Image (spheres, rainbow, N blue to C red):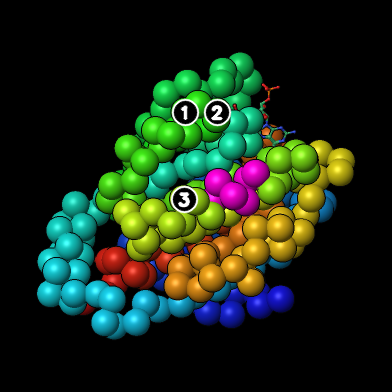
Amino acid sequence: MDLHSHFSIDIASVFGKLKRSARRSELWPALSHEPSRFLGINPPVNRHFDPPSHQTDMGLLSILKKVKEKEKEVRLLILGLDNAGKTTILRKFSGEPIDKIEPTLGFNIKTLEHGGYRLNFWDVGGQRTIRAYWRNYFERTDGLIWVVDSSDRRRLELCRDELHDLLSQEKLAGASLLILANKQDLAGAAPADEIAKVIGLEKSDKFTKRHWSIHGCSAVAGSGLADGMDWMISDIANRIFMLS
Ligand code: G3D
Ligand code: MG
């Protein structure tokens, strides 16, 4: 597998205000207890494809980039089937307690300041009846975080189909895609590379023109989340804020 082959920029180099030597705990204080290694977590896999130049109107793109740069806002949409762990992940990022999480019937929004940027996280409920409303949240999304319950093998194919449907949506065409293979702490959880295969990351043409990365993680243990977020933010920052 291709490991980090195209992503040599680390988060510290992307956000100039952070020291190059910044440690994980400084970057993601809420995840400072994260162990550096966690059983069952596979190395992340990344792919990076630049869109063909004819697909982008460079004039419009540069105006949009300037606006984004001024606002320094990043909009992240967290989606996945119900019970995948989306709300738990968001709570963990925010340093909030993760017990007593109710199923999300609408959505949760959280804003975190990070490296001089405002990260707006949108966590939308994943129940079957609510999925039809996901499209109301696509506008201006910079990054899509797709959360998978790796222990729910029965629904992996449904999970793949829902993701493929999402990726057909024009409004999400430019969004970086981070797949979090969550619940790796549970015995029998499918490892990230197995999930990558089911989803068709290497094979399906849904992914050929997209920046994507998959990471095994456990929201409960807090492991693997920071790596995934570092990739997501550096990819977005590199794509939107660093290009002139
Ligand atoms: P959702 O927002 O995607 O619907 P939630 O999912 O965040 O509400 O989590 C659903 C259930 O999965 C919760 O359990 C939560 O504790 C559990 N969960 C989330 N992440 C992990 C993980 O990494 N490991 C394990 N073992 N469990 C996780 P309950 O029992 O409250 O329904
Ligand atoms: Mg939820």
Check the picture and name the quadrant holding the N terminus: bottom right
Mark 3 or mark 2: name the one nearer the start of the chain. Answer: 2
Asked if residue 162 lies left or right of residue 156, the reply is left
Question: Any atom of ligand 1 within 8 Å of the CB at mark 2?
Answer: yes
Mark identifier at residue 231: none
Give the residue at mark 1: 130
Asked if residue 97 lies left or right of residue 151, the reply is left
**Whether label 3 touches label 2, CB < 8 Å:** no
Local crowd size for mark 2, using a 10 Å CA cut-off: few (<14), some (14–19), many (≥20): some
Q: Position of residue 183 (x, y in %)?
A: 72, 41
Check the picture and name the quadrant holding the C terminus: bottom left
Quadrant of res 199 = bottom right
> What span is in magenta?
158-163
Local crowd size for mark 1, using a 10 Å CA cut-off: few (<14), some (14–19), many (≥20): some
**Whether label 2 touches label 1, CB < 8 Å:** yes
Farthest residue toward the right?
187
Q: Position of residue 69 (x, y in %)?
A: 20, 60
Which structural element holds mark 2? loop
Give the residue at mark 2: 127
Which structural element holds mark 1? helix
Which structural element holds mark 3? helix
- The residues tagged by marks 1 and 3 sit, at their Cα atoms, a distance apart of 14 Å
